[in-house]
Amino acid sequence: MQKNLLYYGDNLDVMRRHMRDETVDLCYIDPPFNSKRNYNQIYNNIGHEDRAQAQAFVDTWTWDDHANDCLTQILTNVNGVQTRQSIDLVRGLDSVLGRGSLFAYLVNMTVRVAEIRRVLKPTGSFYLHCDPTASHYLKLICDAIFVPQGGDYKNEVIWKRHNARSTDQKWPRVHDVLLYYTKGKNYFFKPIQIPADQAKLPHTLITGPDGKKYQTYELTGPGVTQEGESGKPWRGFDPSKMGRHWANSHAAMDEWDAAGLIHWPKKNGFPRRRAAEPFVEEERVVTLGDMWTDIDRINQTAKERLGYPTQKPEALLERILKANSSEGDVVLDAYCGCGTTVSVAQRLKRRWIGIDITYQSISLVLRRLEKAFGKKVMNGITLNGIPRDVESAVALAHKKDDRVRKEFEKWAVLTYTTNRAIINDKKGADRGIDGTAYFMTGKKDNAKIVFQVKSGGVKRSDVATLRGDMEREGAAMAVLITLEKPTHSMIEEAKAAGSYHHEMMNRSYDRIQIVTVKEIIEQEKRLDVPTSLEVLKAARAAATSSQMDLEYSAA
């Protein structure tokens, strides 16, 4: 059986290099988007923007070389995946919006949506999860890419995430938007039925001869017709006088009446079809529509909570996967984040492909899958894009792409600690610390290890500085991970920091250890201090980085 695929890298590059045409049954994406953007800026964002009001958006989407390259790819129709309509649309948006953060977001999405359509099977479906800030623009983009090539817009699904809490002078936003498209006219869709709201009993209930409640249904349909008997009176009732016609044959209604399945109102009113079985309130289900109010967001006490800032509930993805795929189908999440889609796909026996540009997400997905399905799940996953040799590690360290800033440091720390470290991902100065891990010192006690990563130019003074950082952080040990081989003077400086004796292990460790990337890759050298997920949970209150939640709160 083909393995599931987890890619570390830019999803645009991954799809173009590794994914063949028409190989995916269902794609769901939840790309980064901003809910706080000031709408007053949208038509005035040419030139300098008010960064204080748009900072969250600008942090992710800026008009830079990457955005400019995406625009060029669209206008020149690289690989022939754009349509005339999508190219004209982007030209128009360029004139209207100007080259700021919003337009950068839209051109980034345009090139990726076009590639997603390419990899979808003719029967494939696509969901784009967004919010009202930009959903109207995204719908135009998806319309321009899917519809001219035989696809179809099916739904705008509204997901009510939470109740209103805001006191702002506007209607509080409580929902997200899911845009649902199909690549062709023939596609897989299975309606979902859910328990009915017991507070909303049907108004068409009647009491039958046996004293039990029964549901009743219309026998007529809208519109007057002269065709056949559907427009003629039956049992003295003429539907045309009400602007309607019989939706069933006279013979069928005679048969139902003979079986006692026609309800004849005692007062004025048309006869109605009566259900054969009594109405059982507890067993009542309804077909789900395009307004989803029964799935809560991930709250602070949810068992599945990982602390990932945009984590979506598994129930949401389970609904989509069950409606638009079957066992064995291939599900793609090109922004897999904390891995909700791939985890649900694994549980529902779908094959899956996950892509993310940050190694923290890849690390979190691996830990999530291992916890949910056991270590054996790793045997069914092929990892791609992760450095396999020193040369590829050097390439990652020197990659000139601000979107993957500090990715080399994250990869090094998480790989060396087998995904058990907490990445310091704060913007601005990291005060010399790239990651933290906790290890057991007793049944209830733990201590800290700090990590620093250097991609070049290491010297003795770096070790001395790390020693000071270790003392400042109150850490028991520190690890310096370096691309370069340490000098003799660096090793001496590390040894001068002394050793730490682990009572439980009855073993001593150098307080400062130096590890090379070559050792991590070629010798598979890993941290051998007994870290504990339970210890990490207990240490959450002491952790200042929100990445503690990101990496371990549900581990």
Image (spheres, rainbow, N blue to C red):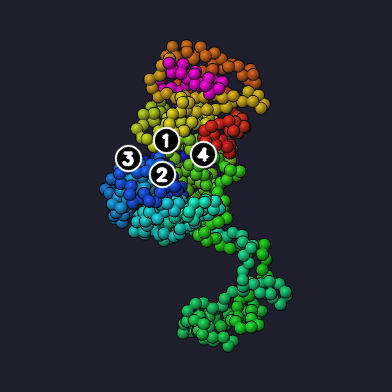
Looking at the image, is mark 1 or mark 4 nearer the viewer? 4
Q: Which residue lies furthest to the right in this view?
A: 210
Q: Quadrant of residue 528?
A: top right
Classify 89 as above or below 398.
below
Q: In which quarter of the image is residue 402?
A: top left
Q: Indicate yes or no whether the magenta region holds residue 474.
A: yes
- Give the residue pinned by disc 4: 365
**Quadrant of the rendering where the C terminus is positioned:** top right
Q: How far apart are marks 1 and 4 (CA)?
A: 15 Å
- Give the residue pinned by disc 3: 64
Taking the spot 50% from the left edge, 28% from the top edge, the residue there is: 435
Classify 135 as above or below 101.
below
Q: Residue furthest left?
A: 76
Looking at the image, is mark 1 or mark 2 nearer the viewer? 2
- Give the residue pinned by disc 1: 385
Q: Indicate yes or no whether the magenta region holds residue 500.
A: no
The 10 Å Cα crowd at callout 3, few under 14, some 14 to 19, many 20 or more, is: some
Image-based side of 444 in relation to 31, left or right: right
Three-letter amino acid code of the residue under disc 2:
Gln
Q: Magenta residues, as a range?
A: 461-484
| Residue 44 visible in the snapshot | yes
In depth, the one of 158 and 181 nearer the eye is 158
Which percent across, then down, holds residue 354?
A: 46, 43
Classify 289 as above or below 105.
below
Taking the spot 42% from the left edge, 57% from the top edge, the residue there is: 182
Q: How far apart are marks 2 and 3 (CA)?
A: 19 Å
- Give the residue pinned by disc 2: 53
- Reading the chain from its start, which is encountered first: label 1 or label 2? 2
Q: Quadrant of residue 180?
A: bottom left
The number of callouts visible is 4
Three-letter amino acid code of the residue under disc 3:
Asp
Taking the spot 51% from the left edge, 39% from the top edge, the residue there is: 365
